[in-house]
Image (cartoon, rainbow, N blue to C red):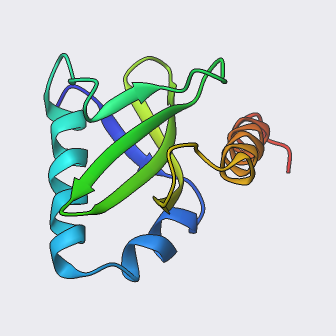
Amino acid sequence: MIREIIFYDNYFKDFFDKQSERIKAKIDYVLYLIAEVERVPEKFLKHMEDSDSLYEIRVKVSGNIIRIFCFFDEGKLIVVLNAFQKKSKKTPKKEIDLAEKLRKEYFKEKKGGK
């Protein structure tokens, strides 16, 4: 394994549990790629242009476009945050804001404070 993937809080799990088996399978496949492949194609993992540290995991199944926010911690650890189904070209600001908030919470908890 090249990268460890951890899931912060239940935002992703709650989203994942509501998806069809086909979408779950594709998400699992993309997460496997990110964990195992040295150079992940931008098609699957892309840095967010409006953020210093957020990345989006990109999953497409038929007409469904799924985005999962994440960030790196200690280089090889990817922390998965919230996820949503994209319905327009532009990523909703509220989803980006939530991901930023969760990233800050993660580091605050990691340092020992809540």
Foreground: 71 or 112?
Answer: 71
Q: From the viewer's perspective, is 22 left or right of 75?
A: left
Foreground: 48 or 4?
Answer: 48
Q: Which residue is drawn at 35% across and 56% down?
A: 65
Residue 85 location (% of width, % of height): 45, 63
Residue 47 location (% of width, % of height): 47, 23
Q: From the viewer's perspective, is 87 left or right of 98?
A: left
Numbered circles on residues, count: 0
Q: Which residue is drawn at 33% across and 78% down?
A: 19
Residue 7 location (% of width, % of height): 47, 54
Residue 24 location (% of width, % of height): 24, 69
Q: Which quarter of the image is occupied by the N terminus?
A: top left
Q: From the viewer's perspective, is 100 left or right of 54?
A: right
- 53 w.r.t. 36: above or below: above
Q: Which residue is drawn at 23% across and 36% down?
A: 35
Q: Which residue is drawn at 50% across and 76% down?
A: 14
Q: Which residue lies furthest to the front in this view?
A: 89
- 35 w.r.t. 114: above or below: above
